[in-house]
Amino acid sequence: MADPMRIRANMAGDKVEVRVLMSHEMETGQRKDASGAIVPAHFIQTVTVTHAGKTVLSAQWGTSISKNPFMHFRFKGGKPGDKVTISWVDNKGDRRTDEVVIGGG
Amino acid sequence: MPFYRLLAPVLAAMLPCVSLAQQDTQKEIERYRQLLQESNPAELYEARGEELWKTRRGPKSASLESCDLGLGPGVVKGAYVQLPRYFADTDRVQDAESRLVTCMVTLQGFTPEEAKRNPFSGTGVPMLTTDPFSGVGRRSVMTDIVAWVASESRGMKIAPRMSHPKEREAYQAGERLFFYRAGPHDFACVSCHSGEAKRIRLQTLPDLVHSAKDAQRAFGTWPGYRVSEGELRSMQWRLWECFRQQRFPELEFASDASIALTMFLAKRAEGGSFDAPSLKR
Amino acid sequence: MHRSRREFLQSGSGAGVLALAAAAGLVRPGEAFAQQWNKAAFDTKSVADTLKALGGSGSTESAQIQITAPDIAENGAVVPITIESGLARTQTIAILIEKNPNTLSADFEIPAGTDPFITTRVKMAETSNIYAVVQADGKYFHAVKEIKVTLGGCGG
């Protein structure tokens, strides 16, 4: 089971400001290990952020997103106490969903 | 001929035309480091470390919650910055990582070899002494726990103890090691870490001999998440890696030599702010 | 043409819609509600090919797209980059790294109500141009910034 994401969601004016740090190797499939064998590609392919049943951000990623990916974005329509849910699916079918409660300003 | 000796005359010759460009480069690198500060993946290690501290593990199925890091059993807050120090129960000077080994052995029932196994996560370079099977992407319990222990001292002043005779001995041994030239390049720590504005490619090297500020910043930022490694790296790792770069024999994990050097560096950094786990290039 | 929409799948009520979608080749069995991943676009190896795969050939340069990133990345493994679009009705923001083995790094879909603003971190194989490609009001625009990538000291 993948590690939980570290998500911060706070109000910035009338917008919700979200910073999320994900735990993932984001292996490109081009690296070799100590024995010389290729380390197979293992990376997050899709990310979805929802609030109140609506998608507020979605992303498709390739192998060139850095290891332990970070994203920062803002959306309107949320308020303190609401939940923001972030999900990712990787190329092996592993997935992770975490949620955070929106804090004050 | 030591590498840095080759570098110096080349740099000197380039100095007139390069100095302004060098300043701009330095500024841009500072900006790169600034932009990175927005998020530190060290958090991921700290979170795992806190969990592991409380998890029952080993033959005794015990947690580390009564581990004594110098401030009493289970006291983690502020423990890292007063290390290395003398411990009566082991009758030796210990740093954070060797103390964690002690606790894993006495509280959890691991053998010393088991406790020291795989101390550095995901390294592509195999460790000879403690982890013949290291590989890319491997987690390290030790790295996770030391990340969390260090984080519990964040913002505090570096204050290693220096009252016990063995603490002074460790300092002196560390100082000797720091100045000891060896290996095929005839390097010592002092070769790179003494003198103004020394640099390897674009990395300026901290002057650990003459600059208290450099020493404080250096010691105060390890452990650190190193983006070039894609892993969180501890002080033990930093010393191990320095030895490797100098083409010295491998520095054994949690060895007396590593503790002595850590004591020397901690003392030189005394009074500085502990800002770890940090984020490094 | 840009991508298949997750919302389409979500609006359905169950087996009926999924069966239809599966039959239409839009979703593979067992991947219900999973977003589609544009494999073709992520396999491209040039800016031109990537733009074509995204449907953005003929993209015009726009000063309304701001790329905030360091001029020099001390390490290519982690390059922080922020893209902000001042174009009305921005729908998507894509990051292209010209000299990477695969050009397309990321493709973000920005629903109405979300700021056309994203910060993330990318890997760069070497000094390269980074393109921020924005689809706004059905048309494509881009901005370019060169980022130098250096090798660290001691080979790191």
Image (cartoon, coloured by chain):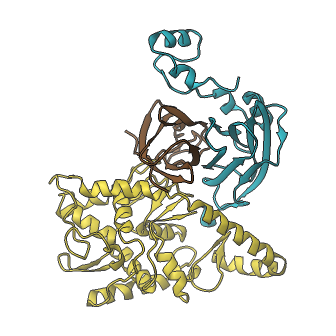
Image position of B32 (left or right of B267): right
Could you say where residue C6 lies in the image, as x and y percent from the top left?
56, 25
The quarter in which the C terminus of chain C is drawn is: bottom right
Q: Is residue B214 above or below residue A43?
A: below
Q: In this view, does A54 lie above or below C71?
A: above
- Let me know if residue A46 appears in the view: no
Looking at this view, name the residue that lies furthest to the left.
B60
Could you say where residue B62 lies in the image, as x and y percent from the top left?
17, 55
Could you say where residue B63 lies in the image, as x and y percent from the top left?
20, 57
Instruction: Looking at the picture, tell me which residue is in the foreground, B76 or B61.
Output: B76
Instruction: Looking at the picture, tell me which residue is in the foreground, B220 or B4.
Output: B220
Q: The cyan chain is which one?
A: C
Image position of A30 (left or right of C61): left
Residue B153 occupies which quadrant of the picture?
bottom left
Q: In this view, does A23 lie above or below C52?
A: below
- Let me know if residue B280 appears in the view: yes
The quarter in which the N terminus of chain C is drawn is: top right
Q: Which chain is brown?
A: A
Q: Chain B is drawn in which colour?
A: yellow
Q: Residue at 68%, 69% (x, y): give it.
A: B202
Q: How many labels does the image show?
A: 0
Q: Residue at 31%, 74% (x, y): give it.
A: B79
Image position of B233 (left or right of B152): right
Image position of B98 (left or right of A58): left
Instruction: Looking at the picture, tell me which residue is in the foreground, B40 or C114.
Output: C114
Q: In this view, does B12 lie above or below C105?
A: below
Residue B130 occupies which quadrant of the picture?
bottom left
Could you say where residue B281 lies in the image, as x and y percent from the top left?
58, 63
